[in-house]
């Protein structure tokens, strides 16, 4: 499970698709499971039940959009660097755009922004769970 430090909500898929290839991700009270996959020196995040990979889009409005890729294959902007920000919490920075995964000012939405270390908005608790 992946939980945002700032608002205590979990990273989840959204019920809303952006188009036929991209699904929005959101923050919610109920956790979902993500698989962290080692990809060279980086990581990919794949939604366990949907088998959709998380990625940062070049599409933006006050920050870049973050989606899952519905075609269920790896996507160019789907690699992240992950490092500890404080004990038990991590930054997740997209390799292609160098933006950090973050909660947004729109309640429940997830975006990607150039700055890391923004009052906990882009810090995540990543917990191992039994699949």
Image: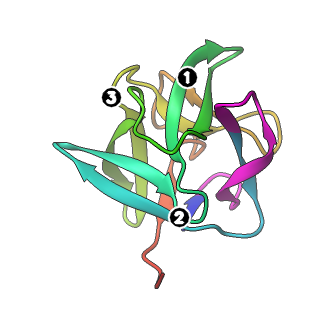
Q: Is residue 36 visible?
A: yes
Q: Earlier in the sequence, mark 3 or mark 2?
A: 2
Q: Is residue 118 visible?
A: no
Q: Position of residue 120 (x, y in %)?
A: 56, 47
**Which segment did they paint magenta?**
4-23
Q: Position of residue 122 (x, y in %)?
A: 54, 42
**Which residue position holds label 1?**
57
Among all residues in the image, which is located at the extreme left? 40
Residue in the foreground of this view, choosing between 5 and 110: 110
Q: Is residue 18 magenta?
A: yes
Q: Residue at x 47, y 37 (%)?
A: 117
Q: Are marks 3 and 2 in contact (CB under 8 Å)?
A: no
Side of 48 relative to 40 (left or right)? right
**Which residue position holds label 3?**
95
Q: What's the CA distance linking mark 2 and mark 1? A: 21 Å
- Picture layout, residue 92 above or below residue 3: above
**Which residue position holds label 2?**
48
Q: Position of residue 23 (x, y in %)?
A: 69, 38
Badge 3 density bin: few <14, some 14–19, many ≥20, Cα 10 Å? some
Task: Give the structural element (helix, strand or loop) at label 2.
Answer: loop
Residue 113's image quarter? top right
Q: Is residue 68 magenta?
A: no
Side of 86 relative to 71 (left or right)? left
Q: Earlier in the sequence, mark 2 or mark 1?
A: 2
Disc sitting over residue 125 in the figure: none
Task: Give the structural element (helix, strand or loop) at label 1.
Answer: strand
Among all residues in the image, which is located at the extreme bottom? 130
Q: Position of residue 3 (x, y in %)?
A: 59, 61
Q: Residue at x 71, y 30 (%)?
A: 20
Residue in the foreground of this view, choosing between 102 and 43: 43
């Amino acid at each position: 499970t992946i939980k945002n430090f700032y608002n205590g909500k979990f990273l989840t898929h959204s019920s809303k698709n952006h188009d036929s290839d991209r699904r929005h991700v959101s923050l919610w009270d109920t956790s979902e499971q993500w698989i962290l996959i080692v990809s060279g020196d980086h990581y990919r995040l794949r939604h366990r039940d949907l088998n959709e990979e998380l990625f940062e889009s070049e599409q933006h409005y006050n920050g870049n959009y973050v989606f899952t890729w519905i075609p269920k294959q790896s996507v160019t902007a789907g690699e992240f660097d992950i490092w500890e920000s404080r004990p038990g919490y991590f930054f997740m920075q997209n390799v292609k755009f160098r933006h950090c995964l973050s909660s947004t000012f729109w309640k429940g939405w997830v975006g990607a922004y150039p700055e890391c270390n923004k009052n906990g908005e882009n810090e995540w608790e990543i917990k191992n769970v039994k699949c």
